[in-house]
Amino acid sequence: MKKPNLCFFCKWNIDMHKCKAYDKIPEEIVEGIVDHRNPYKGDGGIHFEPAPICPLCYYYTGERTCYAFSVIPQEIWTGEFIHTKPYEGDRGIRFKFDEGKLLKAVGPKKPIPDEETIRAYLETLKYIEY
């Protein structure tokens, strides 16, 4: 079964074709044929680890703070808990994707994932084992 390409959201990503594990990311990873949350040949033990998604939230204020929390809880920051659902103490404020923050974060040279890829990423995070 084809998995979504998670490279863009990996903390090791340099661009969609290069990362800390590979000078050229294998096509089978880029195409989602291989789930690189698991070790894969030539990766030197470096495989997908989610980069914090919080900085792409409308309510993120910086330095691991947001309108919902004075300090974002570790399980939300690491993606262990997907904050599109209620979380104790969030005052009813949930993750809301901010495309402007994404554009600012990636800059003009980095390809931007489409909305379907972003949704697949958020959905996939639910199944990552830590």
Image (cartoon, helix red, strand yellow):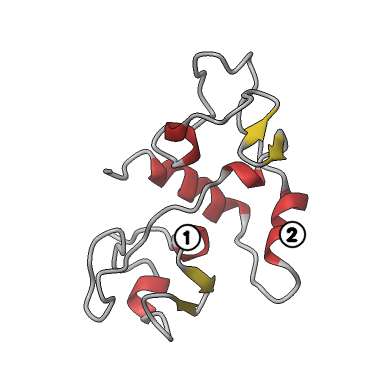
Dot 2 alpha-carbon crowd within 10 angstroms: few under 14, some 14 to 19, many 20 or more: some
Which residue is found at the position 56% from the left and 31% from the top? 72
Of circles 1 and 2, which is in front? 1
- 79 is higher (above) or lower (below) than 103: above
Which residue is found at the position 65% from the left and 33% from the top? 65
Report the residue marked by disc 2.
Answer: 103
**Residue 100 location (% of width, % of height):** 78, 51
Judged left or right of residue 103, residue 115 is: left
Judged left or right of residue 58, residue 90 is: left
Q: Amino acid at mark 1?
A: Lys
Report the residue marked by disc 1.
Answer: 11
In front: 41, or 28? 41
Q: Are marks 1 and 2 in contact (CB under 8 Å)?
A: no
Q: Amino acid at mark 2?
A: Leu
**Residue 76 location (% of width, % of height):** 48, 33
Q: Secondary structure at mark 1?
A: loop
Q: Secondary structure at mark 2?
A: helix
Quarter of image, res 48: bottom left
Q: Which quadrant holds the C terminus?
A: top left
Q: How many marks?
A: 2
Which residue is found at the position 30% from the left and 62% from the top? 35
Judged left or right of residue 82, residue 63 is: right
Dot 1 alpha-carbon crowd within 10 angstroms: few under 14, some 14 to 19, many 20 or more: some
**Residue 95 location (% of width, % of height):** 61, 32
